[in-house]
Image: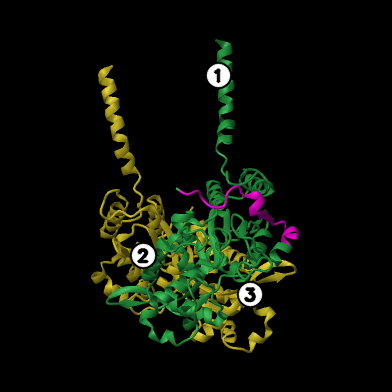
Chain colours: A yellow, B green
Amino acid sequence: MKTSHRSLAFLISLVPLLSLRAADPLPSWNDTKPKQAIVSFVAKVTKPGSPDFVPVPERIAVFDNDGTLWCEQPLYVQLQFAMDRVKALAPEHPEWKREQPFKKLFAAPGDEMVPVTEQELMQIVMASHAGMTTTEFDQIVRDWLATARHPKTGRLYTEMVYQPMLELLAYLRTHGFQTHIASGGGIEFMRPWTERVYGIPPEQVIGSSGKLKYGLREGKPVLLKLPEINFVDDKAGKPVGIQLHIGRRPIAAFGNSDGDFEMLEWTASAPGSGFGLIVHHDDATREYAYDRDSQIGRLDRALAAAPEHGWVVVSMKEDWKTIFPADD
Amino acid sequence: MKTSHRSLAFLISLVPLLSLRAADPLPSWNDTKPKQAIVSFVAKVTKPGSPDFVPVPERIAVFDNDGTLWCEQPLYVQLQFAMDRVKALAPEHPEWKREQPFKKLFAAPGDEMVPVTEQELMQIVMASHAGMTTTEFDQIVRDWLATARHPKTGRLYTEMVYQPMLELLAYLRTHGFQTHIASGGGIEFMRPWTERVYGIPPEQVIGSSGKLKYGLREGKPVLLKLPEINFVDDKAGKPVGIQLHIGRRPIAAFGNSDGDFEMLEWTASAPGSGFGLIVHHDDATREYAYDRDSQIGRLDRALAAAPEHGWVVVSMKEDWKTIFPADD
C-alpha cells in the first residue's frame, strides 16, 4: 500500500514536466537561436523579482503585418485588392477607359503587374478606398477576402499567414503581452479580419489611414471615407503611430523590412529590456527569397544594423519548420 | 436531523441574495431612474441568449473626461496647467513680457481669468505643450498634478473626480466592458494619470493631439512634440477619433456637453443596443450648476435632444449621493 502510494506520487510529480514538454508553445520554430532568444526574453521580463521584470500593463509587443505576419509577394495584398476593386467599379466609371492610370490597368492581361508611378498608385488607392462609409468598406474587404486567392499557391490570402508567427502571437499573449499591429497597410483594410486570423482585435491595429467625415445619411449616422490621406504609418511614422494609439513604448517589435527600422529602433532601445526581431525572407522554395534589391519589402539598412542593435534575425529557411498553416 | 438540514439549505439559499445586496456596485448613485437604466442596460447586453446580448469584445464604452469624469470648473484643468506652465517658462522667454497673450497673463493678479481669443489660446497651448519630448512632457504633467490644487476646494485635481463615475467605470469593466476615454482634452495630458485615477490605461485614451516627430537626440530615439495640431477630438471629431483608435462602434457613451453630441448620436443609435447618458451639472451647492449659458461645458443642444434620442440625463443633485471621493 505504502509503496503503491509512493509510486503514484512519483508518477504525479512527473506530470508538470511531461505536460511542459508536450506543450511546446512554438512547435513550428526550429530550436535555433531566434527561438532561444524569444523564450529567454519572455522568461526574463515575466519572472517576478527579476531585474528585467516588466509588469503586465507594460508588456506591449508591436508587429508589422506585410511580410511579417502574412505574405507580401508577389504584390502587397492590399494593392491586389485595390486593382481588383478598380476593375469591379469600372462599369460605373466609363471615363476610366480613357484616363490613366485606369486605362493601362484594364489593358494588362490577367494578373500581370502594371508599372505605375507613386501618384498613379495613390489615384488607384483613393478610387478603391474612398467614397463609401466605414461599414460599407468593411463589408467590401470581407467579401473580397472570402474569394480572392494568391496567384502562386491558390490559397486564400488569410491562409498565407506565417504559422510560426501565429504561435508567437499566442505565446506572448499567454505571458500577458498585448500584441498590436503597426503596419504601413491601411488600418480599415486590416481590421475586418485581424481578430479572426491573428486574434488581434480592431483596437489593437495601427495602420495608415484616410480622413473620415462624420455626418447623417438618410437620418442615420455614418463615417464617410474621404479621398485624403490622414496618416502614413511607415518608417518614422511607425513610432508616431504607436505613440498616438498606445501611448506607451513597446518592449518588443517584429518586422521584416527597412520600413520597420524606426519601430525597431524606438522599441529595442527602450529603457530596460527592448527586444527586436527581423523576419528575413530567404526561402525561395517554400515562400520567396528577397531583401536588398526588392521593390516590395526591401530589407537593407535594417539587416545591416541588426548586429549592432542586437536585433534577432530569423532565417525563414533555417529557423522555421513550417511556413504556412497546414491545410484543413 | 432532516429539519435541521432543511433549515441549513434554506439559509444557504439566501447567501447569494444577501451578498448581492451587500455588494451594491453603484453605492454613490441614488436608486433613481439613471441607476435603474444603467443596471437594466448592462443586464440585457450581458445575458447570454438574450436578443440584446453583446459579446465581450464588442462591449465598448466611451467616456468624455472634462465635466463627465472630473470637474471642469471654473476652468478646464488643462487650461490652468497651460497658464501655470507659461508662467513657469517666463524666465526663459523675456520677450513674453512685451508680447500678447503672455503679457496680459502675467499682468493678471493671482488666479483671475484672463479673456483671450481663440488664436491667443492656441499660442498659450503651443507654448506650453510643444518643444519637448513625449517623455519630458509626461513628467511635467505628473509633477504639476502632484501639487496643483483646485481654487475652490483646495483638493488635488485628481481628487476632483466623480465618485459615482468611478463606480460606473468599475461596474462596466466587471461586466466585460472596455472603458475608453474620448475627450476634447489633450491625449498626452491625460495619459500620465488616467490609469492610476480611473483604471484606464494609455491605450484606451483618445483625445486631441499635436503632431509628433521621431528622431535621434544625442544618439537616443525621441518623439518630439511639435507646435502643430494633429487632431481635434471634439464634436464631429469624436466619432472619427473613436473609429481611428477603436475601429468598432461603441455601445455606450457618457458625456456632459454639446461637444459630446455626435459621440452620443453615433453610439446610441448603434445597431442593437446603444446607450447614451448625459451628466447634468445642476448642483451649485456640492459642485457647480451650469448648462445652456456656460462658456465651459455648454449643454444646450444635447440636453434638448436627449428625450427624442432616449439618452439618460443624470441630475447630479437628485441622482448622486456623493460627488467626490471621501477624503482619506
Q: How crowded is mark 3: few (under 14 residues within 10 Å), some or many (20 or more)?
A: few
Cα separation, mark 1 vs mark 2, equals 58 Å
Q: Nearer the viewer, residue A246 or B27?
A: B27
Badge number at residue A253: 2
Q: How crowded is mark 1: few (under 14 residues within 10 Å), some or many (20 or more)?
A: few
As drawn, A49 above or below B234 = above
Residue placed at 27% from the left, 58% from the top?
A37
- Indicate which label's residue lies in the foreground, 3 or 1: 1
Chain ID, mark 3: A
Q: Magenta stretch: residue A5 in it? A: no
Residue placed at 68% from the left, 46% from the top?
B32
The answer to whether residue A284 shows anywhere in this view is yes
Instruction: Confirm or deny contact between disc 3 and disc 2 (CB under 8 A).
Output: no
* Rendering quarter of residue B136: bottom left
Query: Where is residue B313 drawn, in percent x and y?
Result: 68, 56
Residue placed at 49% from the left, 86% from the top?
A117
As drawn, B102 above or below A171 = below
B232 horizontally vs B214: left or right: right
Task: Read off the residue under disc 3.
Answer: A88
Give the secondary structure at mark 1: helix
The answer to whether residue A116 shows anywhere in this view is no
As drawn, B101 above or below A60 = below
Badge number at residue B8: 1
